[in-house]
Image: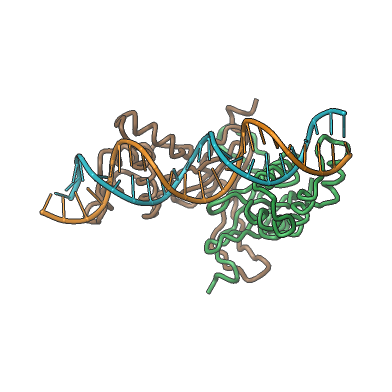
Chain colours: A green, B brown, C orange, D cyan
Amino acid sequence: MNKLSLKAVEEMASGGKFKMTPQRRVIVSYLEKATSHPTADDVYFAVNKKFPMTSRATVYNTLNWLKSVGMLRERFEGEKMRYDPNCERHHHFVCAECGMVEDISSELIEELGTIKLPGNHDVRSYEVTVRGHCSSCRD
Amino acid sequence: MNKLSLKAVEEMASGGKFKMTPQRRVIVSYLEKATSHPTADDVYFAVNKKFPMTSRATVYNTLNWLKSVGMLRERFEGEKMRYDPNCERHHHFVCAECGMVEDISSELIEELGTIKLPGNHDVRSYEVTVRGHCSSCRD
DNA sequence: TTGATTGCAAACGGTTTGCATGGGA
DNA sequence: TCCCATGCAAACCGTTTGCAATCAA
């Protein structure tokens, strides 16, 4: 599963035991446009602009649903969970000041080659987190 | 500040506005021996083996104190915060199954060289998280 | 002596759950 | 029609805070 899209979600829902609802459509549309890993509350406020009575339970329910089908990744940064609609292999830049997260496409970070660790661990993947100050915070 | 040690903490405390207590000594001793990033609760149970009335407040108080003087790093993994007594530059292996975290010394991961990102971010550091199944979970 | 630390309990904040109502397929 | 999803409120859980008593320096 790569980039989250409303189309892909609709397709997946049709025929399965999951249903599309207006709230879910808004949540997915918001997520597919999001660029800096929204928090659950970001999503909550976004849906409520369109559907003012949407509860947090619905938001978490939807986020966990998308997560469970592999269309969304969860990542803790700073003080809360953030949701990453990009499921292609990629890395991250995190601003130490404002907590903003930006995707770094995997081509921008050179390959580490085969990782050989001591012990007998089964290595599956690796990710790089680059830290620093983002352009707005660097002054 | 590099590796947490009781000696370094005692030195830092003497003369400053911070005081050593029996509880703090046990906590620091436990942390300096710990190898897989204990959670606050791990620490809590460890201290309580020696001082059965120790409260969680004391544990968090001490952890935050060590963190604030740069002798301990905090890292969210899985569902809770974990504390890393190793403040030298290093990377991590995380088990997807049991959540165990193991340090990877920085020599084991090849250098990424200068990281050049699009935009105008000020890059300070990077860390690599290797994921997979640890030797006990790989079956 | 003095002010930092302790234990306790209550508060907090993000996330989850239980349940009755509502709505998609 | 049949479940799944929703909204609400309460529960949960890790962490923080307020406070009076205690203890290190």
Choose between A111 and B7: the one closer to the eye: B7
Residue found 77% across the figure and 52% down from its top: A28
Does residue B69 appear to the left or right of B15 in the view shown?
right
- Hey, which quadrant is residue B98 in on the image? top right
Instruction: Name, please, the residue furthest toward the top.
Output: B139
Q: Is residue B32 visible?
A: no
Q: Quadrant of the C terminus of chain B?
A: top right
Residue A45 coordinates in the image, percent (x, y):
66, 57
- Hey, which quadrant is residue B27 in on the image? top left
Does residue D21 appear to the left or right of B55 in the view shown?
left
- Hey, which quadrant is residue A115 in on the image? top right
Q: Quadrant of the N terminus of chain B?
A: bottom left
Residue found 72% across the figure and 39% down from its top: A68
Residue found 53% across the figure and 61% down from its top: A96
- Report the number of discs: 0
When the figure is inspected, residue D11 is found, relative to residue A99, above or below; the finding is above
Does residue A74 appear to the left or right of D22 in the view shown?
right
Choose between D8 and D20: the one closer to the eye: D8
Q: Is residue A99 visible?
A: yes
When the figure is inspected, residue B97 is found, relative to residue B91, above or below; the finding is above
Choose between B119 and A37: the one closer to the eye: A37
